[in-house]
Image (spheres, rainbow, N blue to C red):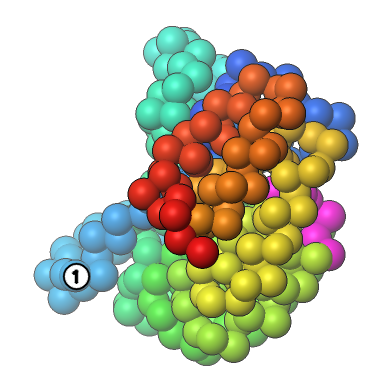
Amino acid sequence: MKALLGAVLFALPLAARAAEPVPVNLSADTSLLFSLEPLTITAPRVKQEDLIDPRINAHLLRLLQQRMDARPDTLASSDASLFNLSRLSTLTGYSLKTRYTEIGFLLTEGLAGTKDYQLQRELENAARLAKNVQTRAAALVALAYSKDLRYLTLFQGALNDQNVTVRFAALESLLILGDRSIQLQLGGSARNDQSVAVQIYAAAGMWRMGDSFGKEILLRFLDHQDWFARAMAAYYIGEMGGGYEYRRLIQYLTREADPSTRAEMATALMKLHPRKDEP
C-alpha cells in the first residue's frame, strides 16, 4: 500500500521482478517480492469525509466484515478473465494485478483515514482479530491514515506478529503515522526482524526520518548474499543518497554479478548523479 499490499504490501509498500527466482532464505517474503514501493493509497475520504454517502460506508463495512475470516485471495489463479493480467511482469502490470486480485488493497484505499466511529471501531477489530492476514494488514494501514496516536500501541504490537504481511503493514502504518516516537521501533525492525525485506524497509524509514544509522544498515545490505536484498538496498540508497553513496554504488556496480541487481544499481546511480559531487 503506500508501501504493502503490493501495499499487499504492504509495500514492498518493492522494482518488478515477477520472472526472477525467489532465493531460498527469502521464501517467507514471497508476498513482498515484486514491488519496492507498494501501490499508492490515495485515501480519497481524507479530503471529503463529510461528503461521503452513508451507503458507501455501509457497503465498505460489509465487505470488511465479510473478509475478516476469508481465506487469502486466489482470484488471479482461479478467475479466467484475469489470466492475462496475472501474467504481467512489469511494475505497472504487477500493480494492476495487485489492485484487482487483492481486495484488501481496495478496502484500504476506500477506508483509509475514516473518522466515522463505527468504521474505525470495525477496522480496529479487524486489525486485532481477523484471521485473514490481508484484511488485518489493510485495517492497520487504513487506520494509520487517520493520523491518530491512539492507534500507536496497536501498530507497535503488530510489529511482533508471526506473519510477515502483518508486520510489514504495522511498519508501514507507523511510517504513515509519522510520529518521532516511532524511531525506536524502526530501529528494532531494521536490526531484528526475521524478514530481510522488512529490515531493509525499516532501515529506509529510519533514514527518511533523519536517523543516519538507517543509511549505514542499507549500505551493509549491499554485501548481502541474496540479490534481492542488494537490489532493494540499492533502490532506497538511490532515492535518498548523495555524493558519498554515488561513489559507493559505483564501486559495487563494477563487481556485481546479478543482472537484476546491476540494473537496480544503475538506476539508483542515475538518480544520484545530480548529487555526485556532494561531499
Which element is circle 1 on?
A: helix
* Residue ID at (57%, 35%): 265
Q: Where in the figure is residue 7, as x and y percent of width and height?
A: 50, 48
Q: x, y percentage for residue 75?
A: 52, 26
Q: Quadrant of residue 60?
A: bottom left
Magenta region includes residue 196: yes
What residue does disc 1 label? Answer: 47
Q: Is residue 166 visible?
A: no
Closer to the camera, 159 or 25?
25
Q: Left or right? Give the position of 226 relative to 179.
A: right
Q: Residue at image x 49%, y 40%?
A: 269
Asked whether, in this view, residue 160 is left or right of residue 210, the answer is right
Are there few (<14), some (14-19), or many (20+) residues within 10 Å of tag 1? few
Numbered-mark total: 1
The amino acid type of the residue labelled 1 equals Lys
User: Closer to the camera, 262 or 136?
Assistant: 262
Q: In the current view of this chain or complex, which residue is farthest to the left?
A: 51
Q: Which residues are magenta?
A: 192-198
Instruction: Looking at the picture, tell me which residue is in the foreground, 141 or 122.
Output: 141
Q: x and y percent of residue 118 in the render?
A: 40, 76
